[in-house]
Image: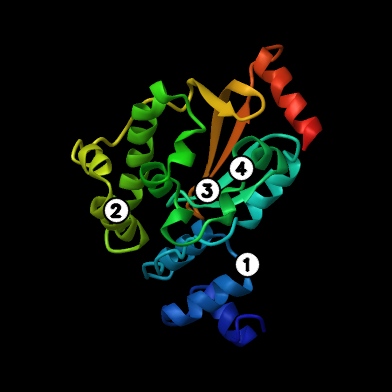
Amino acid sequence: MLAGISADYYSRLEQRRGPMPSEQVLGALARGLKLSPSEREHLFALGGHSAPRRVQRDEEASPSMRRIVEGLADAPVIVFSRFGEALLQTPAAIALFGDFTRFEGMSRYLVYRWFTDPAQRAIYPPEDHSLRGRVFTVDIRAAYTADPSGTAGEIVEALLAVSPEFAEVWRLHEVDVTHHHELKRYRHPQLGELELHSRRLTDPDEGQDLLVFLPEPGSPSEAKLQRLLSMS
């Protein structure tokens, strides 16, 4: 009933009696069975078709990411789209970095703000700026390589038009910059410098990354973060 096909036809499909189903029938079955993107692709393969390209969420955090964030409410956590747009932040992340979700236009994307907005760079010590710029460029290159004519292409085109620095880094064609497991330094207007690990959880089905920021246990940065949380 949910798929809009008869019970007899569905039974014949399960028993491999009759012709192969159409893409429309497979899509209806996937919706009726509430299949995950990977299960949907498998169903289409069984039916002799290629699954339609996944529509990844670019404007809001996926339900699975949202549930994880709710369980980490006391930690600084940000969910980013594959283009570097902040889709969701915990109150601790807003207190630490500011509200990244408030931006509009091209400024929604972290890489664009990095190369055009000095306030974004104030979060990091000046001596780390070169590495941060390379890291953010590598991230947008990954999205650009997957879909150069889409949103990532628009971001890259806009940055090439306004930022000679970005153009120089872009020409390096870097695809990997080791940084994810390093202890990173961040600057806060009231608390000064904090050293935090950032851990990344990726949802490949939705094309989203969850970053959680954690201090070393017993460190001065942990004490500063606890103080920040008590103030927010």
How many marks overall?
A: 4
Question: For the C terminus, which image quadrant?
Answer: top right
* Mark closest to the chain's N terminus, 3 or 4: 3
Residue 156 tag number = 2
Question: For the N terminus, which image quadrant?
Answer: bottom right
Q: Residue at label 3?
A: 80
Q: CA distance from mark 4 to mark 2?
A: 24 Å
Which residue, as the protein is rendered here, is positioned at the far right? 230
Q: Quadrant of residue 53?
A: bottom left
Given contact means CB atoms under 8 Å apart, are the residues at marks 2 and 3 in contact?
Answer: no
Picture residue at 45% right of the left edge, 54% below the top: 107
Please state if 41 lies on the left or on the right of 164 as rendered. right
Q: CA distance from mark 2 to mark 3?
A: 18 Å
Q: Which mark's residue is nearer the viewer, 4 or 2? A: 4
Given contact means CB atoms under 8 Å apart, are the residues at marks 3 and 4 in contact?
Answer: no
Element carrying mark 3: strand
Please state if 222 lies on the left or on the right of 58 as rendered. right
Q: Which mark's residue is nearer the viewer, 2 or 3? A: 2
Which residue, as the protein is rendered here, is positioned at the far left? 171
Instruction: Between residue 99 and residue 83, name the one nearer to us.
Output: 99
Q: Which mark's residue is nearer the viewer, 3 or 1? A: 3
Residue 34 tag number = 1
Q: Residue at label 4?
A: 98
Q: As displayed, is residue 6 above or below residue 185?
A: below
Element carrying mark 1: loop
* Mark closest to the chain's N terminus, 4 or 1: 1
The amino acid pointed to by label 1 is: Lys
The amino acid pointed to by label 3 is: Phe
- The answer to whether residue 21 is seen in the rendering is no
Q: Residues within 10 Å of mark 4 (few under 14, many from 20)?
A: some
Residue 141 tag number = none
